[in-house]
Image (spheres, helix red, strand yellow):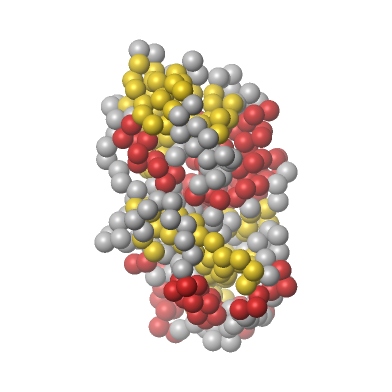
Amino acid sequence: MYDLIIIGAGVSGCCIAREISRYKIKACVIEKGDDVASGTSKANTGVIHTGLEAPPGSLMAELCVRGNELMYEWAKDLNFPAEKNGKLIVCTHEEDMPLLYEQLEHANANGVPECEILDREEVLKREPNLTDRTVAALWAPTGGIVCPFNLAIAAGENAIMNGVEFQFETEASSIEKAKDGYIIHTNKGDMETKAIVNAAGLYSDKISKMIGIDDYTIHPCRGEYFILDEKVGSKLSLPAYPVPNPKEGGLGIHLTPTIDGNVFIGPSSEYIEERDDYSATQKIMDLLIKDGGRIFPHIKREDFIRNFAGIRPKLASKEEGGYHDFVIEMRDEAPNTINLVGIESPGLTSSTPIAKYVVSL
């Protein structure tokens, strides 16, 4: 009998495990993959977001702004690399300037510190290899980069050192209410627990149904990326984004340096039917080259060394577009459970305060 079972060993699940391990508790993380960060967490840009993109007043905004601060603290505590190099949201058309000022209003409303609009001259002084069509940019100095694997491994290993168990290749097939809690039926046998945290990412709606909450449907949304050679990394020192289009439900195709010295181009945004369809398509690859070149003209095909795809667990359907707020809840119909659903971007940045919030619940 466990006191707590966390379903899912992505960055949220691993951070929750680390945070709960501060207490005297018999806890276990089960993961259907063969390692931590083997689902949505394995394929993203690794940006430490500032919180300025999130809708003001949302849980997403609150957790992202706090997560930005905590990520650098956790990096120091757990000894994984994180770099605070700032972030630019680049405007290349005068008619988009109102959207840029709208982003600044979001930043101020959400309490993101020290954001400002820079003119063309100042932008190109900070990042001289951006397009000469730059009109202005929003500068957010608290932005940064991190490797999601490093975060998940560091948090998971610290949790294990403090007594939390991890069981991989263990998939929940159904959950049954029992006298003292729940029985989780898995491919490795039955597991009993007094409480459950659903941190199952792309499959969080399915786990939610298993515990008795039938309100959610995850809409998988694929984002494809190119990885550029390290020699391009010297030409880009910080993440550079286009002015976002609110209807697309993403931040637009952007350029992001990595902790290892490469550069990512992406992600695209395409709703798909299958939750495990990580295909990379020629159509999207061509789009990445075209759109990425609009703000970073130093893109050459010979610099592309790899491509990959990730899948966002969106609660907003294709017809709705945009975002839904994070769902982190306790419900009477599923006692002693905490449900995390729709933890898409900025879920990586928010994972540390998500852990603290879940443990407080």
Residue in view at x 30 percent, y 56 percent: 317
Residue in view at x 40 percent, y 76 percent: 98
Residue in view at x 54 percent, y 24 percent: 27
Marks counted in the figure total 0
- Name the quadrant containing residue 96: bottom left
Q: Position of residue 222 (x, y in %)?
A: 43, 59
Q: Is residue 179 above or below residue 114?
A: above
Q: Position of residue 303 (x, y in %)?
A: 66, 75
Q: Position of residue 178 (x, y in %)?
A: 35, 16
The residue sitting at the bottom extreme is 132
Report if residue 103 is visible in the image.
no
- Name the quadrant containing residue 297: bottom right
Q: Position of residue 325 (x, y in %)?
A: 37, 50
Report if residue 165 is visible in the image.
yes
Q: Is residue 11 left or right of residue 127?
A: left
Q: Is residue 130 above or below residue 229?
A: below
Q: Is residue 342 above or below residue 109?
A: above
Q: Nearer the viewer, residue 310 or 348?
A: 310
Residue in view at x 63 percent, y 53 percent: 147
- Name the quadrant containing residue 306: bottom right
Q: Is residue 158 above or below residue 81?
A: above
Q: Quadrant of the C terminus?
A: top left
